[in-house]
Image: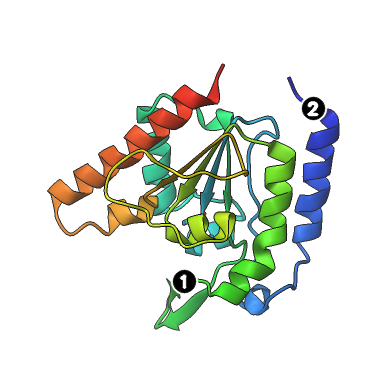
Amino acid sequence: MTDPIRAAELERIREQARACRACDLWARATQTVFGEGAVEARIMLVGEQPGDQEDLAGEPFVGPAGAILARALADAGIERSRVYVTNAVKHFKWRPAGKRRLHERPNATEIRACLPWLQSELALVRPRVLVLLGATAAQAATGRSVRVGETPGNVVASPLAPHVLVTLHPSAVLRSDSPESREARYQRLVTDLRFAAEHAGA
Ligand code: URA
């Protein structure tokens, strides 16, 4: 059931985040890309930072990594409307390469500066399952260095949610160096998302 108070609070925070200047990344980004999804979602997915397309669209995971994530969610039997999707860092960090904008990994200061937004999202959504996509999200959310690991089921003990799972970032699937590795990585992502679905409850 929709909780209007929590939903309004999430909207208020989303509005505030539009003007965030807590680190320098805002200056070269088009806009803040805040999380998206229902406040009562039982599964929260956290990525690293918006990419080129997300920066332009103002929505998380709408580019190539988002296409992998959408397919993996569908293969795991999860409707996108059941999840809240966000990023550890909410501005696109990039460097120019000709006409292209190349993704750059956010540093510890930028991740720390952005953390209050993620903490607010967690406090309001209160997911049953928190899925951390890749090492940056895992580090940002848990405050410690967490290995993504090679196999599915990398559950970490954390007060952030009843179940906290670290899995591959969907862009790791795109970066695979062979079709076999790409398929194995994709299946790992799907297996972990199935785990999320099973532990999210009705
Ligand atoms: N990669 C991320 O980590 N987040 C996005 O929103 C898109 C790509």
| Residue in the image at 66% along x and 79% along y | 24
In this rendered view, identify the residue nearer to me: 63 or 187: 187
Percent position of residue 71, x then y:
37, 36
Indicate the amino acid at tag 1.
Arg
Is 148 left or right of 30, judged from the image as shown? left
Q: Kindly report the distance in space between the C-alpha atoms of the residues bearing marks 1 and 2.
A: 35 Å
Indicate the amino acid at tag 2.
Asp
- Give the position of the N terminus as an image quadrant: top right
> How crowded is the residue under tag 2: few (<14 C-alpha within 10 Å), some, or many (20+)?
few
Is 92 left or right of 96, judged from the image as shown? right
The verdict on label 2 being within 8 Å of ligand 1 is: no
| Residue in the image at 67% along x and 44% along y | 122
In this rendered view, identify the residue nearer to me: 62 or 198: 198
Q: Name the residue under label 2.
A: 3
Q: What element carries label 1?
A: loop
| Residue in the image at 70% along x and 47% along y | 121
